Image (cartoon, rainbow, N blue to C red):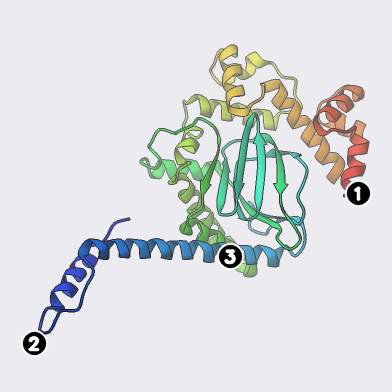
Amino acid sequence: MRLSILSLSGALLLASSSFAGLKEGEQPVETLPLEQSAECSISGDFMMQCADFNSLTDMIKTQILRLLPAQGRLETSVAGLTLTRYDDATSPERCLCSPMLAFVAQGFKRSFYGDRETNYGKGQCVVLGIDVPGIFQIDGATREVPFLSLSVRLDNQIISHLFAEMPTLSEANPASSSPIGVMDANPELLDAFRRLLNLLESPERIPFFAPMIMREIHFFILSGSLGAQLRLFSTSGTRAYQIRRAISWLRANYKASLRIENLADMAHMAPSTFNRCFRRVTGLSPLQFQKRLRLHEAERLMLVENHDAMSAALAVGYESGSQFTREYKRLFGAPPRQDMERRRAG
């Protein structure tokens, strides 16, 4: 944080004027040395930023509580904006996450993506640059102090356009090749979240303002501490980019039989190199990743579209019902029917 020339000159003017017009025998009013004045100004700016951060976080918390008066998940009328509330701590739950930015307005979340543990709490954001299976657990939530978060789906087209328009954006080498990272939110990003939530009260404004605010949010992420990592997965020719393309193909073709050689050719890598890079990014082998995709989609078909276990298994590419049941139980902890009964009862 820099002290402006104007504030320095103002401090000098104030110091000199305190001696002007003094009568004989009068003592000048004691003033702080210039260095201490500068320190006070910087400290004051810092306190104002802290106040802005806390105020904006409280506003976002109030908005989420108003929109979600009880535990649940809300896919809002702003495309890509989702709100989440938990009134109780949870046991570990499996999920399949898409590229996103999530901000915690209140509470604490423990997550595992691949073989990495990623924990974040109030005032922090987690950024996922690729599709990745994960496990999450909410700690310490109560009805009086619920866990509250919002998430924004990351748009690869916006990311590519911003990098093309601003080549110097996040030029630094990434500290990690991981597609997952945690950062502290800043007042600019929080204000963009606040304005995006405000649009939900004026639906007629959403088509015009939401795309601009979404672009603004992407800019703040790319220009922040995790921008270099996201650039790695968005720059054509990098291995990270090729792995991201392979993951996108798997996501779109999870039902198809998989030959690692074909996927490696698509990524322009030798099969052994591709396997190693894929596992480094996702924590899973390509075959394990495909299996997770199939099982999560089968779970969704049973839970949301009321498929029975056999029809869900066939729909996602399984040929054997017993193999599906065995692998489903290994991942989710119970056979499909028992798992569905538990979830619907909860």
**Residue 314's quadrant in the figure?**
top right
Nearer to us of marks 2 and 3 is 2
Disc 1 to disc 2: CB gap under 8 Å: no
In front: 64, or 171?
64
Q: Is residue 105 left or right of residue 87?
A: left
Q: Quadrant of the N terminus?
A: bottom left
Of labels 1 and 3, the one closer to you: 3
The residue at the point 46 percent across, 61 percent down is 50
Q: List x then y, in percent, for residue 129.
A: 56, 38
Q: Of the residues under marks 2 and 3, which one precedes in the sequence?
A: 2
Q: Residue at x 72, y 23 (%)?
A: 288
Rendered location of residue 275, percent (x, y): 61, 17
Q: Residue furthest left?
A: 24
Q: Amino acid at mark 2?
A: Lys
Q: Residue furthest front?
A: 25
Classify residue 295 as left or right of residue 239: right
Residue 296 seen in render: yes
SS for callout 1: helix
Where does residue 27 sit, x and y in percent of width and height?
A: 14, 80
Instruction: Tell me the kind of residue under disc 1.
Output: Ala
The crowding category of the residue bearing disc 3, from other C-alpha atoms within 10 Å (few below 14, some 14 to 19, many at least 20), is: some
> Residue at label 1?
345
For the point 51% across and 24% down, the residue is 239
- Camera-side residue of 131 and 59: 59
- Comparing marks 1 and 2, which lies closer to the viewer? 2
What residue is shown with label 2? 23
From the viewer's perspective, is residue 240 above or below residue 209? above
- Residue annotated with mark 3: 58
| Residue type, numbered disc 3 | Asp
Dot placed on the residue nearer the N-terminal end, 1 or 2: 2
